[in-house]
Amino acid sequence: MEKENTMISISFLVIVGLILIVLAASIAYIVARWHIAPPDANGVDDVAVAGELVDLGEFITDLADSNRHVRTGIFIEIDEDYIEEVNEHSVQIRDRINTIIRSHKTEALSSENWEQELKNEISKGIEIFISGEVKNIYFESFIVQ
């Protein structure tokens, strides 16, 4: 009889242990999901709508302070509606980007946020020539030689 009670209590403990493990794992999953991607106030996650990528080509230009130069490939992300405007003003846009890059010194391109600052400056320079907004700038490569 005592052996039966021991078997029942061991089985009971194993079942309770498994239930606790499953419950703890479920709670951990829910908490992790909540902290990683909390829903916004309306309960709907914001989804960024991607634009079209336009290849502006390769740029090779000198830097402001030395005989060093930059070689980079640049893509811009814009709404499809403004692609024709970019194509119409491609010469002015390329000239503006060259002017922006040429105005920077070598040491400026080694600062902590240089890439984002340069992208913002290029975006503003392009938006002078188009009626839309530049969503993002992508450097295919960025080499200082």
Image (cartoon, helix red, strand yellow):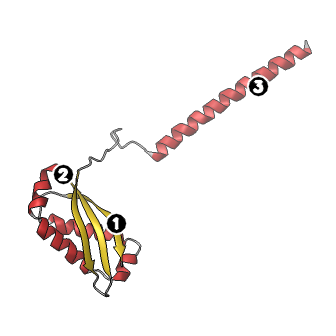
* SS for callout 2: loop
Which mark, residue 13?
Answer: 3
Q: Which badge, 1 or 2, comes first in the chain's sequence?
A: 2
Q: Nearer the viewer, residue 87 or 24?
A: 87
The residue at the point 22 percent across, 59 percent down is 55
- Find the distance from the CA under tag 3 to the CA under tag 1: 61 Å
Task: Report which quarter residue 143 is drawn in.
Answer: bottom left
> Which amino acid does the dot numbered 3 rest on?
Leu
The residue at the point 32 percent across, 44 percent down is 46
- Find the distance from the CA under tag 2 to the CA under tag 3: 61 Å
67 is higher (above) or lower (below) than 140: below
The C terminus lies in quadrant: bottom left
Q: Residues within 10 Å of mark 2 (few under 14, many from 20)?
A: some
Instruction: Work out which residue is located at the far bottom of the displayed protein and give it.
Output: 66
Instruction: Work out which residue is located at the far top of the displayed protein and give it.
Output: 1
* SS for callout 3: helix
Q: Which residue is mark 2?
A: 79
The nearer-to-camera label among 3 and 1 is 1
> Which amino acid does the dot numbered 2 rest on?
Asp
The nearer-to-camera label among 2 and 3 is 2
The residue at the point 29 percent across, 82 percent down is 63
The residue at the point 29 percent across, 80 percent down is 104
The nearer-to-camera label among 1 and 2 is 1
| Left or right, residue 48 beside residue 86 | right
Q: Residues within 10 Å of mark 3 (few under 14, many from 20)?
A: few
